[in-house]
Amino acid sequence: MTVIDKIKTAQKTLFTFELMPPLKGNSFDEIAQTVEQLLPYHPAYINITNHRTEQVLVEHPDGSIEKLTLKKRAGTASIAAAIQYKYGIDVVPHLVCGGCTRSEIEDMLTDFDFLGIHNVLVLRGDPAKGEQHFVPTKDGYRYAVEALQQAMQMNAGHYLDESLHDAHSTHFCAGVAGYPEMHSESSDFDADLLHLKNKVEQGASYIVTQMFFDNQKYFRFVNECRKIGIEVPIIPGIKPLATSKQLTVLPQIFHIELPQKLVDNVQRCTSPQDVRKVGQEWCLEQCTELIKHKVPALHFYTMSKADNVETVVRAIFG
Ligand code: FAD
């Protein structure tokens, strides 16, 4: 079932979460553990992130150093399929443009389709490590909307090879990312919203937001979206703060602000357990208010660690 159909038929706010493929060298069991821990709370679907290739320096035993281009977290499609068929839960693999040609994007979508996966979250991806700005791959895309258009073309039976006739039409339900606190590269909030609106006009069925810790920012974002005619469901992205280090790391990586009250509460903590408790309580309050506002779903960023998320969802969906 597609995400949009689930949202349309749901009687209440859905529980969903996102997982990262394990680091190379680990097994599927690692991810299975996280899934099984959150399974009792009936996730409506599970997102699996996608990671671009990066350059790493590898030191060999003889002291020589080699620059390798590799993915540290591979296997988005196979993990998605393994989860879908092992647990009977719908999955939403992410697709990122960064580091991919149009043809590789078509192949990724083809893999999803062959695997019986009809949901996809279409993203641009961040700049490659060491790069200040996003650099599109040769014969790739600069913006997520272009990959989205490609997916929609496949839904209409059009592939890159235009000589294909009567080609199979895929049935992708595509989501896209939105930023209540504005995307870091945007010049202004309104311009960012117009680019988001463009993604919806090009076929996105719903939006999932960047994480936020102040619900007012989400409410304002939804209001502004509605004002300019974005009518699709907007799913809030939620994460329980887990360590005091995240007070600096989360704003840096995700370009978000943490409310001063949350910062103060964490700074008063005397142990890592206290910090986790503060993070969970804050998150639970956020979720309770969001559910009161009848949000379509709560999308939890687990970062593949289920404990904190489980404490929160047990209180809501348990
Ligand atoms: P876009 O929609 O392309 O926007 C990027 C920037 O370009 C924005 O500033 C936008 O305003 C601007 N823009 C868009 N269109 C135009 C245009 N036509 N002209 C000028 N400017 C334009 N990253 C990963 O690598 N893997 C993941 O699995 C992943 N999952 C994510 C899940 C969620 C829910 C979210 C919110 C983010 C995720 N990300 C992931 C991060 C995401 O890839 C980055 O935030 C990235 O920097 C932007 O992606 P986007 O799809 O929003 O890009």
Image (cartoon, helix red, strand yellow):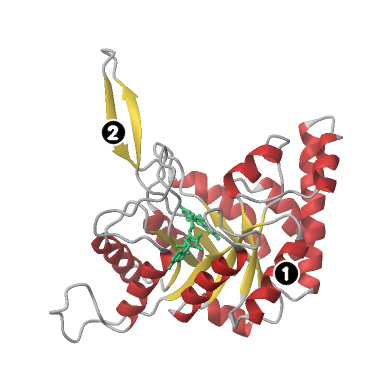
Q: Nearer the viewer, residue 129 or 90?
A: 129
Q: Nearer the viewer, residue 102 or 239?
A: 102
The image position of residue 119, as x and y in percent, is 45, 71
Residue 318 visible (yes or no): no
Label drawn at residue 73: none
On screen, residue 91 versus residue 163, left or right, reads right
Q: List the single residue furthest toward the top.
A: 62
Q: Nearer the viewer, residue 135 or 263?
A: 135
Q: Nearer the viewer, mark 2 or mark 1?
A: 1
The image position of residue 306, as x and y in percent, is 64, 48
Q: On the image, numbered disc 2 is attached to which residue?
A: 68
Relative to 109, is 54 above or below?
above
Q: Nearer the viewer, residue 258 or 151?
A: 258
Mark 1, secondary structure of its residue: helix
Residue 12 visible (yes or no): yes
Placement of the C terminus among the 4 image quadrants: bottom right
On screen, residue 141 versus residue 31, left or right, reads left
The image position of residue 66, as x and y in percent, is 27, 25
Label drawn at residue 220: 1
Q: List the single residue furthest toward the front.
A: 187
Q: List the single residue furthest toward the bottom.
A: 166
Residue type, numbered disc 2: Leu
* Residue occupying image coordinates x 61% and y 60%: 182
On screen, residue 93 versus residue 136, left or right, reads right
For the residues marked 2 and 1, what is the alpha-carbon distance in whole angstroms? 44 Å
Residue type, numbered disc 1: Arg
Q: Are marks 2 and 1 in contact (CB under 8 Å)?
A: no
* Residue occupying image coordinates x 37% and y 60%: 142
Mark 2, secondary structure of its residue: strand
